[in-house]
Image: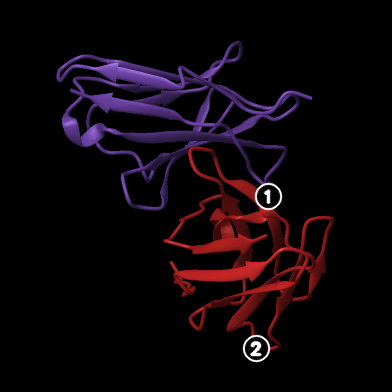
Amino acid sequence: DAKTTQPNSMESNEEEPVHLPCNHSTISGTDYIHWYRQLPSQGPEYVIHGLTSNVNNRMASLAIAEDRKSSTLILHRATLRDAAVYYCILSSGGSNYKLTFGKGTLLTVNP
Amino acid sequence: NAGVMQNPRHLVRRRGQEARLRCSPMKGHSHVYWYRQLPEEGLKFMVYLQKENIIDESGMPKERFSAEFPKEGPSILRIQQVVRGDSAAYFCASSLSVAGISYEQYFGPGTRLTVT
């Protein structure tokens, strides 16, 4: 499986935008990029996913580099409820359902 | 619309006993996935089931672990003769469809298994 690299932790202030980076230099053409987040003692929550084009939904935006070797999750206005571990995950071709979570990025949001 | 439900939320078993974990997918979802999260690690895929069928069990330990998703009722993850190393959080997720296209998985709150 292609691997992803994320910073261990990031900090943000409430009401400010947050850009969470993810490197995936070994991504293949059929790999989807998924973002999930997990609050303590809870199950992961879907955030967004994409293949090649940038994606927007009510929670966030996903910016995918032209060469697809990196992507950025953008939270437009961080709130205290956005404090969580964010996981960038690649899923490949015929088994897009198989998600492997790494250590993710712990996002702290300051009031 | 109720989310994915798992029970029990916490389960304590002694070594050698059996553990049964239940998962009810979201209404209308016919695809169920089980994941395991060991302490200080990320979630790892275990098995993917559709109604009455195991589609992919490549992440399941070869022995003692089994999963089913019957026509009626919840999906069950069964661990026989539990050992201390089985202590973990077990998460179930469900989704609407596969069809070769990536889709979102909705996760339950997890069952935390402790083996004493």
Structural crowding at the residue carrying mark 2, measured as other residues with C-alpha within 10 Å and reported as few (<14), some (14–19) or many (≥20):
few
Tell whether A96 sits left or right of B84: right
The answer to which of marks 2 and 1 sits earlier in the sequence is: 2
Kindly give the residue lying farthest to the bottom in the view shown: A67
Report how far apart the C-alphas of labels 2 and 1 lie in the structure: 32 Å
Q: Residue at x 40, y 53 (%)?
A: B42
Residue B91 at x, y = what percent?
A: 48, 35
Q: What color is chain A drawn in?
A: red
Amino acid type, residue under disc 2 in the picture: Asp
Camera sees residue B28:
yes
Residue B2 at x, y = what percent?
A: 73, 23
Residue B84 location, quadrant = top left
Closer to us: B21 or A76:
A76
Residue B65 at x, y = what percent?
A: 30, 28
Kindly give the residue lying farthest to the front in the view shown: A111
Host chain of mark 2: A
Quarter of the C terminus of chain B within the rendering: top left
Q: What color is chain B drawn in?
A: purple
For residue A81, the mark is 1
Residue B24 at x, y = what percent?
A: 60, 21
Q: Residue at x 64, y 69 (%)?
A: A12
- Compared with A97, A104 (above or below) is below
